[in-house]
């Protein structure tokens, strides 16, 4: 889905902000540190029914104006609230009140997903060196296929076996699929890059790709 | 239970936008209060995570890995072949940051790591990512204008240097092995690690300064 989070290649942005940040300054504000620590606990919570890809999608669905203007750690806070409300563990009224208004529901529904499996159940469709094109079609849900690759042709640079497909995981229907590194020449992504010695390497799952 | 319903979560966000205070610190406080009262999170676990990411986990871990790769060519070969197994040799959890891939800078190659879709980064190895890494400008521009971005960071690359940009779209994570500075032959691994700054592990710094060996 093409929401504003899909920033790669978007024009109009100026110089990179905050370039001089100190190596050892992990957090600028206490609330940011608190928010970050909560994300770690939230993701590893033993009675969570959510997964990392759903959580990413929940960030992507923040109102576009909020996504572009609110601070990074604040977006994570809003994600945790939205995911909790969706799950049913807490309500909008409780977050607005800043306190629990009803006893906690104890529910366990953790979705287990398979990790990276060696090799695959099905043979990979592509081999190193094969030209591939990222499909044009746009899905209505979460995907990890950046918009800037759509319809562009690159070359398989590596094959990484089967990995949980982010799109399926974000819909609560986990399955594994072959994952590849696809190398795109800059000029094949952006016509104005003709002649530049630049390549962009993108991890793409098999169903994102087709033979050109 | 999670609905996995994209439109439902967007609708919830619209309500949160309307009803929540705008001040981030107030939102964080409300979130913590509710989730701790619901027993989903424990205050102690949150405190421990704050401490770990403020003090223990950080770019120094990456510097150690790079220094080992500089002094031990066989280690570097193993690191490039299987990042997870190689960092486990140094006592880090092999899956500390998803599946780690090390990419090596040379005289003719400069690597640059980005996550255009969110903010993926080898967190549990290198700590939280710098604010610029999460900034919209970096995410938008590093894939189509990497040389321009590098120039803003003070890195000038000749036309003969290939820029390789790595977009972190899967659960694999990247660490750049910068070039070892000239004039550091015979330096201890610890002294070499002291030369490695965070931006060089991401690719927005190229020439590490040899300076003088701290002993």
Image (tube, grey):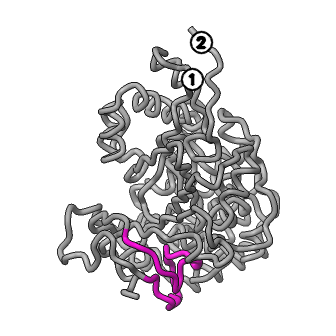
Q: Indicate whether A59 appears above or below A142.
A: above
- Residue in view at x 51 percent, y 62 percent: A104
> Which of the 4 image quarters holds residue A110?
bottom left
> Which of the 4 image quarters holds residue B143?
bottom right
Residue B22 in percent (x, y) is at 82, 63
Range shown magenta: A133-156
Q: Is residue A51 visible?
A: yes
Query: With B180 as the anchor, is B146 left or right in this view?
Result: right
* Observer-nearest of B55 and A134: A134
On-image quarter of the C terminus of chain B:
top right
Residue B64 in percent (x, y) is at 46, 29
Q: Is A155 in the magenta?
A: yes
- Residue in view at x 37 percent, y 53 percent: B99
- The residue tagged 1 is B194
Same chain check for tags 2 and 1: yes
* Observer-nearest of B173 and A186: A186
* Chain on which label 2 sits: B
Outermost residue on the top side: it is B215
Query: With B52 as the anchor, is B14 left or right in this view?
Result: right
Magenta region, mostly helix, strand or loop?
Answer: loop
Outermost residue on the bottom side: it is A137
**CA distance for labels 2 and 1:** 8 Å
Q: Is A210 in the magenta?
A: no
Contact flag, marks 2 and 1 (Cβ < 8 Å): yes
Query: With A204 as the anchor, is B198 left or right in this view?
Result: right
* Observer-nearest of A63 and A4: A4
Disc number placed over residue B214 in the picture, else none:
2
Residue A61 in percent (x, y) is at 63, 77
Question: Counting residues from the N terminus, which is met first, the one under dot 2 or under dot 1?
Answer: 1
- Residue in view at x 32 percent, y 38 percent: B86
């Amino acid at each position: 889905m093409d929401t504003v989070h899909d920033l790669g290649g978007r024009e109009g942005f100026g110089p990179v902000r905050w370039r001089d940040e100190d190596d050892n300054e992990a957090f600028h504000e206490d609330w940011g540190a608190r928010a970050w620590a909560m994300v770690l606990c939230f993701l590893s919570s033993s009675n969570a029914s959510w997964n990392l890809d759903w959580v990413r999608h929940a960030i992507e669905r923040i109102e576009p104006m909020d996504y572009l203007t609110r601070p990074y750690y604040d977006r994570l806070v809003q994600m945790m609230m939205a995911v909790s409300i969706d799950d049913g563990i807490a309500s909008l009224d409780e977050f607005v009140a800043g306190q629990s208004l009803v006893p906690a529901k104890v529910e366990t529904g953790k979705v287990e997903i398979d990790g990276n499996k060696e090799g695959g159940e099905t043979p990979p469709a592509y081999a190193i060196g094969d030209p591939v094109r990222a499909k044009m079609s746009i899905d209505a849900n979460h995907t990890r296929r950046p918009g800037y690759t759509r319809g562009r042709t690159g070359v398989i640079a590596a094959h990484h076996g089967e990995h949980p497909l982010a799109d399926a995981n974000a819909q609560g229907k986990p399955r594994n699929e072959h994952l590849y590194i696809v190398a795109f020449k800059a000029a094949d992504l952006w016509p104005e890059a003709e002649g530049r010695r630049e390549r962009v390497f993108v991890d793409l799952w098999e169903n994102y790709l087709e033979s050109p | 239970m999670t609905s996995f319903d994209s439109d439902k979560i967007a609708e919830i966000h619209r309500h949160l936008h309307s009803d929540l205070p705008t001040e981030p610190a107030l939102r964080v406080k409300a979130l913590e209060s509710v989730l701790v009262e619901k027993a989903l999170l424990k205050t102690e676990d949150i405190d421990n995570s704050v401490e770990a990411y403020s003090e223990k986990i950080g770019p120094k871990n990456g510097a150690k890995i790079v220094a080992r790769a500089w002094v031990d060519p066989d280690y570097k070969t193993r690191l490039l072949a299987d990042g997870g197994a190689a960092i486990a040799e140094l006592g880090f959890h092999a899956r500390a940051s998803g599946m780690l891939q090390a990419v090596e800078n040379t005289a003719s190659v400069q690597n640059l790591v980005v996550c255009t879709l969110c903010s993926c980064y080898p967190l549990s190895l290198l700590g939280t990512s710098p604010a610029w890494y999460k900034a919209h400008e970096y995410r938008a521009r590093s894939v189509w204008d990497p040389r321009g971005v590098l120039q803003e960071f003070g890195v000038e690359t000749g036309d003969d240097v290939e820029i390789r940009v790595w977009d972190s779209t899967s659960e694999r994570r990247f660490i750049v092995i910068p070039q070892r500075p000239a004039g550091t032959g015979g330096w201890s691994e610890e002294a070499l690690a002291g030369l490695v700054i965070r931006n060089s592990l991401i690719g927005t710094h190229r020439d590490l300064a040899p300076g003088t060996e701290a002993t």
